Image: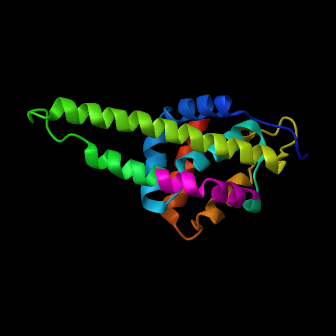
Amino acid sequence: MKHNKAIVNAEDFWQYAGSRYGKGDVAPLAILLQDRHGVNVNILLLICWCIEHGYIINLPQLNAVISAVEASEHTLKQHRLERKQAKPEGKQDANYPQALAKYNQLKDDELVLEKAQQAIIVETVNSLGLASLPSGASSMSGVFNASIAALINAYGLREKQEARELISQLLKQLS
């Protein structure tokens, strides 16, 4: 069944993403997928949301979402690099308090950028008319959700066993 009305709002998705990102090993697995395989963590969290809520995002739809966040992803990558470079080295440094304050401000700014990107994702998803699994056939019932295949294909991960294993490990964290 296709849905043409809004299926999620930005604040609900922000709350969902934060709760899932902080669950078990989701964060380190997501960061490995980001750093080693170029997977956008917010897109990955969207796939998790689709799986847990019984929606299917196909490859053309997922590519539309990826395209929609391209500019914000470029900005986030630049900001993330700046934050990583600003991370204070040692507490014994006389400039440590200022360096830590700058680093913490950059972390806060990054969260604002992440939330803005998620709003773009939600707006795009709501415009796509995602299909839903039949009632009772949720992700946790063992039904394969094609959103996973879309993610693997969108990021060219079919031949990357490590990436597929990381995705599998991450999905196990959801149940």
Residue 138 lies, with reference to residue 60, above or below; the image says above
Taking 78 as reference, is 147 left or right?
Answer: right
User: Front-most of 134 and 8?
Assistant: 8
Say whether residue 118 is magenta.
Answer: no
Residue at the spot 79% in from the left edge and 36% down from the top edge: 7
Identified at 50% across, 57% down, the residue is 74
Residue in the picture at 67% in, 29% down:
12
Residue 104 picture location, percent across and down: 33, 33
Q: How many marks?
A: 0
Q: Position of residue 80 (x, y in %)?
A: 40, 48
Question: Residue 25: in sight, yes or no?
Answer: no
- The answer to whether residue 29 is above or below residue 6 is below
The span picked out in magenta is: 61-75
Q: Position of residue 115 (x, y in %)?
A: 56, 37
Quadrant hosting residue 134 = top right
Residue nearest the observer in this picture, 127 or 43: 127
Q: Main secondary structure of the magenta part?
A: helix
Q: Residue at x 61, y 49 (%)?
A: 43
Specify how the rendered protein is coloured. Answer: rainbow
Does residue 112 show up? yes
Task: Indicate left or right for 174 with 103 as reference.
Answer: right
Q: Residue furthest right?
A: 1
- Quadrant including the C terminus: top right
Q: Quadrant location of residue 87?
A: top left
Residue 101 image position (x, y, % from top left): 27, 31
**Quick one: 82 or 23, which is closer to the camera?**
82
Q: Is residue 129 left or right of residue 69?
A: right
Magenta segment: does it hold 64?
Answer: yes
